[in-house]
Amino acid sequence: MSKPKFLVVGAGFAGAVIARELADAIDCHVDVIDVRPHLAGNAYEKTCSETGAKYHVYGPHIFHTNDARIYDYLSRFTEWLPYKHKVLASVEGVGDVPLPVNADTISLLTGKSIANAEELEVVLAEVRVDIPKPENAWEYALSYYGEQVSELFFRRYSWKMWGIDLRDLPVSVLARIPFRTGTNPYYFDDSFQSMPKAGYTSLIEKMLDHPRISVSLNVRFSKEMELGYSHTFCSMPIDEYYGFEFGELGYRSIVFEHRHGEQFPHEVPTVNFTDTGRYTRKTNWDLYPGLGGGCEALVTYETPCDYRENNMERYYPVKTTDGRFSKIYECYRDVSKANASITFIGRCGQYRYFDMHQVVANSLTIARRFLLARG
Ligand SMILES: Cc1cc2nc3c(=O)[nH]c(=O)nc-3n(C[C@H](O)[C@H](O)[C@H](O)COP(=O)(O)OP(=O)(O)OC[C@H]3O[C@@H](n4cnc5c(N)ncnc54)[C@H](O)[C@@H]3O)c2cc1C
């Protein structure tokens, strides 16, 4: 009997985990294709041809997880550099303040000294707007943080990032943003936080380095390819696969603008803008471990936009209060369930915002369920 052949569309984290799990588990052949000229999907990094600085092409990617199983799994393919992420927000007339919002942020904005969580509550009580049952994210923000913080950190950011007013977003969007009642300045609370020593591209390259796996870059998926395979695992956008039959899913994208040798008077690598301009944040790659290191600083500015304005580069699934895109996605998901020879994986295949650790966990589950069902 000939070996089973599997097709994996996309050489990002989702595709790489699936390919590796299949190759490790059974005597098979796995073909991985990607339309881009590189591995690692949106976690890809490269060296700037002008400055020699190493940077993440699709924006800074920080690895973090609370799941030791995921950290151990990836540690088979990389060593790590310790790194605990800190972010500051630049506020006109105030300076840099910590993000996520913590007691120091509120203290710097209000000019009041805050020694503990009780004092923070007193300061917040003075500015909170009384809205007993917030019906959207703006009302939630006002009821929790008051007008100044809501406007500076949430409303302007939401408008820049999503092109959506906070009034049109569900409460859940803000309810999951961390708020620190103490002075912890770190962005994540996870027990494992680090950057891969040789980079994400090397990590994915090692994951795909297996005698049962072949990788072809610069190859766009087309439906006739499926014929030669017993199963396809697909991380391409699910609406595109089905020819947009039920409508187009919404995605935000980001245009990255690189500046050489710019002054960067901040102590952390990424600084968010709270003004009404178009940039959401800027990054100095020299301040990330294992990155930067060019002849002059490389600073990258980010401007969010609709994905159709940026070469169809889909980065963030859009969630709205009316759930219009989720409903479209459910139509595609239901149709895909009826086809036993394809599984949609990853961010664009499942229309979910996954961080890297989440996409690894999700792909491991998908691969193991598939292998179990095969027997
Ligand atoms: C700006 C930004 C910052 C982020 N920061 C972080 C962070 O700090 N920490 C974190 O944990 N996560 C972060 N993420 C999320 C992280 O990028 C994702 O978790 C991860 O990339 C998802 O992997 P994936 O394989 O699902 O998708 P992708 O990485 O997008 O890979 C999918 C691959 O499929 C290929 N493909 C698509 N269509 C086709 C086709 N028709 N034919 C062939 N190939 C195709 C694409 O070219 C792509 O390479 C960030 C994401 C963005 C956009």
Image (spheres, helix red, strand yellow):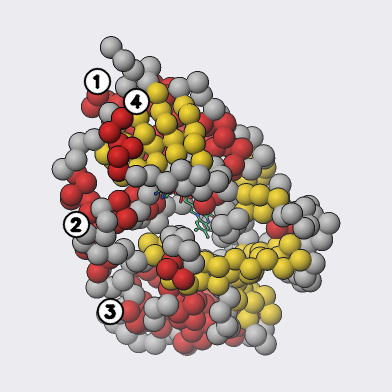
Q: Please tell me whether mark 2 sits on a helix, a strand or a loop.
A: helix
Residue depth check, mark 3 versus mark 4: number of the one nearer the observer: 4
Q: Where is residue 241 in the image (x, y as percent from the top left)?
A: 30, 51
Tell me which label, 1 or 4, sits earlier in the chain: 4
Query: Which labelled disc corresponds to residue 131?
Result: none
Q: Which mark is residue 5?
A: 4
Distance from Cα at disc 1 to Cα at disc 3: 48 Å
Number of other residues with Cα within 10 Å of mark 1, as a class: few under 14, some 14 to 19, many 20 or more: few
Pointer 3 or 4: first along the chain: 4
Quick check: 68 left or right of 242? right
Mark nearer the viewer, 1 or 4: 4
Q: Where is residue 131 in the image (x, y as percent from the top left)?
A: 32, 85
Q: What element carries label 4?
A: strand
Q: Specify the label residue 331 is tagged with.
A: 2
Q: Distance between the residues labelled 4 and 2?
A: 28 Å
Question: Which amino acid lies under the numbered mark 1 shown in the image of this protein?
Answer: Gly
Q: What type is the residue that disc 2 sits on?
A: Cys
Is the C-beta separation of discs 3 and 4 under 8 Å?
no
Residue 135 numbered mark, or none: 3
Q: Earlier in the sequence, mark 3 or mark 2?
A: 3
- Label 1 beta carbon within 8 A of ligand 1: no
* Image quadrant where one finds the N terminus: top left
